[in-house]
Amino acid sequence: MRQAIHNLEASKIREVANAGLGRADVLAFWFGESDEVTPEVIRQAAIDSLQRGETFYAHNLGLPALREAVARYTSRLHPAVDASRIAITSGGVNALMLAVQALVEAGDDVVAITPVWPNLTAQPAIMGARVRTVALQPVEGEWTLDMAALRAAVTTGTRLLIVNAPNNPTGWTLTRDEQQQILDHCRDTGTWILADEVYERLYYEPTANRCAPSFLDVASADDRLVVAHSFSKSFLMTGWRLGWLVLPPALMDGMGKLIEFNTSCASVFTQRAAIAALEHTEDITPRVVAHLKACRDTLLPLLAQVPGVKVAPAQGGMYAFFQIDGHTDSLATAKRLVVEAGLGLAPGEAFAPEAQGWLRWCFASKDPQRLVEGVSRLKIWLAANPQAKP
């Protein structure tokens, strides 16, 4: 196997989850998904498709009806995007990997803003790229981006900048002005931007179009910008493995070939389900976002009241990100919480070295009382373990 694959680190989130396998008493908040099932109208569309016998290959870039629906959906939130710029993918992860395969060669210089979901730095490494990072900094408990540091890191030799905002795990979100600054700088350096915006609808600040700022709002169609999306979060469809890319026209033909050599196409019945999701988006997504905001507003104040806990505000996403005084090894702490407290969280070090000592708590819970019980378990455990074991 290639050395780049050997060099990949196994998922530390999975490592913690494995410690709780088979334990029904564990309250699990480690993975980035809701425990609420996909709405019935979406599931029924897939069932109907299967009943019609739609079990054959589709176009590499996706069903025309779905590409049109995604374009209409995107154009309601942002400046108009034509369906000819949409590629349907087999999941958000697949969308991101396809983008990296399209843009990155071995030896290329890639910069990523971290902490971030580890796949985003692993994917260019798989391609043999040299991955450097610009770290967000916690300032008075809130994660912020040092724009001067980013400009210094992204040079004319940088092939790709990877940005995830709203961010997993911190909840940090770019402002429109920051996006414009980044776009202008990358135009000057000739650097591509890969924007992971899968959490754009999970945004809790008041906005006219009910979503986070997007690079699509400031970029032109021909900019060196690829935007990745997923049906997983806003439509409760994590297990369906369906996403999409918004691409410059010049990349579309090549992306069709690349999809052919990866997955051929997304399955038709899942695409029919996605069409139903978009047709009912105003019935589904606002309810999902309102519920997640209520979950956030339940969990964060409770965590902030726990002695020794420092929690960062979450403008978007579905995560609380926090530190515990005296517990600086996040992996060891997360494992102990599973075994000793029945509480499943993700270790911060899974997302970047600078997130060592932080923990991520996914608050996407159908029953907010689970969050209350989780904080209670954390408080009891901390009372018995105020400091990490030597």
Image (cartoon, rainbow, N blue to C red):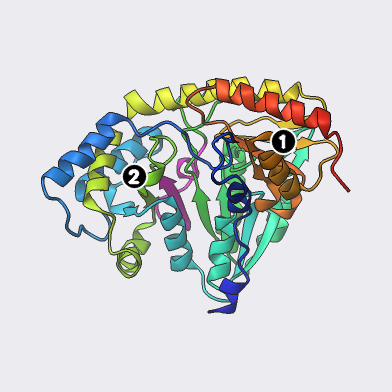
Amino acid type of the residue that numbered disc 1 sits on in the rendered structure: Phe
The image shows a total of numbered marks equal to 2
Position of residue 76 in the picture relative to residue 19 (left or right)? left
Between 142 and 37, the one nearer to me in the picture = 37
Please give the range of residues in magenta: 213-230
Q: Which mark is residue 81?
A: 2
Position of residue 325 in the picture relative to residue 9 (left or right)? right
Between 303 and 100, the one nearer to me in the picture = 303
Binning the other alpha carbons within 10 Å of mark 1 as few (below 14), some (14 to 19) or many (20 upward) gives many
Position of residue 260 in the picture relative to residue 155 (left or right)? left
Is 202 included in the stretch rendered in magenta?
no
- The residue at the point 34 percent across, 44 percent down is 81
Up the image or down, 298 lies above or below 2; here it is above
Q: Quadrant of residue 389?
A: top right
Amino acid type of the residue that numbered disc 2 sits on in the rendered structure: Val
Which residue position is annotated with label 1?
322
